[in-house]
Image: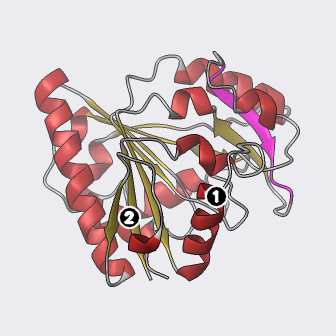
Amino acid sequence: MAISELKLPQGVNAHEFKSPVLLAEGLALNVAKQLSEAIDARGTATLVVSGGRSPVAFFQHLAKQTLDWSKVVVTLADERWVPVEHTDSNAGLLKRYLLQGPAAKAQFLSLYSATANLELAAEQADRLLAELPPIDVLILGMGDDGHTASLFPNSPNLADALKADGTRRCYPMLAPTVPHQRLTMSRALLASAATTVLSISGQSKLTTLSAALAGDDVAAMPIRAFLQPTLEIYWCP
């Protein structure tokens, strides 16, 4: 199956690359261009990224782009509730692979806080995100279960987090099959991004995307909330 075989909603653009390296390079060039245009227009730019292993090459290529990084705000669509030193910390991942060299001048907003419990951490992150400038570029990934950010099917707070008109920005979330508790931006905040990119690779992700396109139950596959016109999909085998 190729992404060109999928029946995408009108307005959704798909970009197919021959390898993960070429995808990472292409995405980094496009994101840097959009951030630069935002800086020219408003004097600042905001980038929201997802963690995990998949974006590492993208982070490395983006860090090499010529950009006034001191005018860029970077934060995460979701985070594991673990200290930055932990191997599973998304903030730690960014510090190792994106916020290096000139890119270290970017302002990083961390969702994690060492509070007494996950709910308090989410409340603190929610207050922090109230100060977040408008999101220029959002990079999402997708799990084989159709989750994106940390909007997991069957998680206790999912219904509230998926409200299109919700006012809360961050929710505590539980990943059903993964040990760590999570913090995630709400659907409403994520959907406010000027540009949203879904970056995926491999046939299994294409199969998941095909299944998501075939139905409309957002709670069953939260990625469906973002399969809207203006979405950019980056895919490689």
Q: Which of 110 and 142 is in front in this view?
A: 142
Asked if residue 17 can be seen in this view, the reply is yes
Q: Picture quarter containing residue 36? A: top left
Q: Which of marks 2 and 1 is in front?
A: 1
Please provide percent x and percent y for residue 3: 43, 72
Residue under the image location 84 percent in, 60 percent down? 179
Q: What residue type is labelled 2?
A: Tyr
**Horizontal side, residue 100 vs residue 113: left or right:** left
Image coordinates of residue 104 in percent, x first then y, are: 31, 49
Specify which label sits upstream in the sequence, 2 or 1: 1
Q: Is 1 left or right of 171, judged from the image as shown?
A: left
Residue 127 lies within the magenta run: no
Q: Where is mark 2, residue-wise?
A: 234
Image-quadrant location for residue 120 = top right
Q: Give the range drawn in magenta.
A: 168-176
At 85% from the left and 34% from the top, the residue drawn is: 117
Horizontally, residue 221 falls left or right of residue 61, namely right
Residue 149 in view: no
* Quadrant in which the C terminus appears: bottom left
Residue appearing at x 38%, y 22% in the figure: 133
Q: Which one is in front, 175 or 218?
A: 218
Instruction: Give the distance between the C-alpha atoms of the residues marked 2 and 1, in whole angstroms.
Output: 19 Å
| Crowdedness near tag 2: few (<14), some (14–19) or many (≥20) residues, C-alpha within 10 Å | many
Q: Is residue 169 one of those drawn in magenta?
A: yes
Numbered disc 1: secondary structure: loop
Dot 1 amino acid type: Ala
On screen, residue 201 above or below 174? below
Compared with 4, 184 (above or below) is above
Q: Name the residue under label 1.
A: 214
Nearer to us in this view, 41 or 191: 191
